[in-house]
Amino acid sequence: MLTHIVFFKLKDGSEESVARTAQVLRDMEGKIEVLKSIEVGIDVLHSERSYDIALITKFDSLEALEVYQVHPVHKKVIEHMMQVREASVSVDFES
């Protein structure tokens, strides 16, 4: 199993903007066959070092993650994220 985690800091950190973007991420659920699970979390602490949104996705393999990366649904999400994000960081690990 491969876990892909991405943290996003948005240009507009307002509650409405964060909720809208979190929903864009959640909307991938059920639309990409290789995506085995998806969890989207919104930060509740709002500390200086916090990011706004965490995306946790799981795949059967690294090859499945590569399929996800170029899937048309994911590419539309990337377009949205390029517009709204200030920064992002990611971690990918096998378990």
Image (cartoon, rainbow, N blue to C red):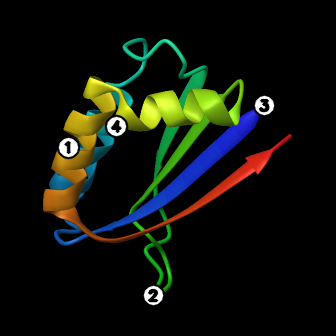
Dot 3 amino acid type: Met
- Mark 3 near mark 4, Cβ–Cβ under 8 Å? no
Q: Quadrant of the C terminus?
A: top right
Mark 2 vs mark 4: in front: 4
Q: Which residue is mark 2?
A: 48
- Per the model, the C-alpha gap separating discs 1 and 2 is 22 Å
Q: Which residue is mark 3?
A: 1
Mark 3 vs mark 4: in front: 3
- Per the model, the C-alpha gap separating discs 1 and 3 is 29 Å
- Per the model, the C-alpha gap separating discs 1 and 4 is 9 Å
Q: Which residue is mark 4?
A: 25
Q: Mark 3 vs mark 4: which is more N-terminal?
A: 3
Q: Mark 2 vs mark 4: which is more N-terminal?
A: 4
Which disc number belongs to residue 46? none
Dot 1 amino acid type: Arg
**With respect to residue 36, does 85 lie above or below?**
below
Residue at the limit of the structure toward the bottom, as seen here? 48
Mark 3 vs mark 2: in front: 3
Q: Which residue is mark 1?
A: 20
Viewer-side residue, 63 vs 44: 63
Crowdedness near tag 2: few (<14), some (14–19) or many (≥20) residues, C-alpha within 10 Å: few
**With respect to residue 66, does 54 lie above or below?**
below
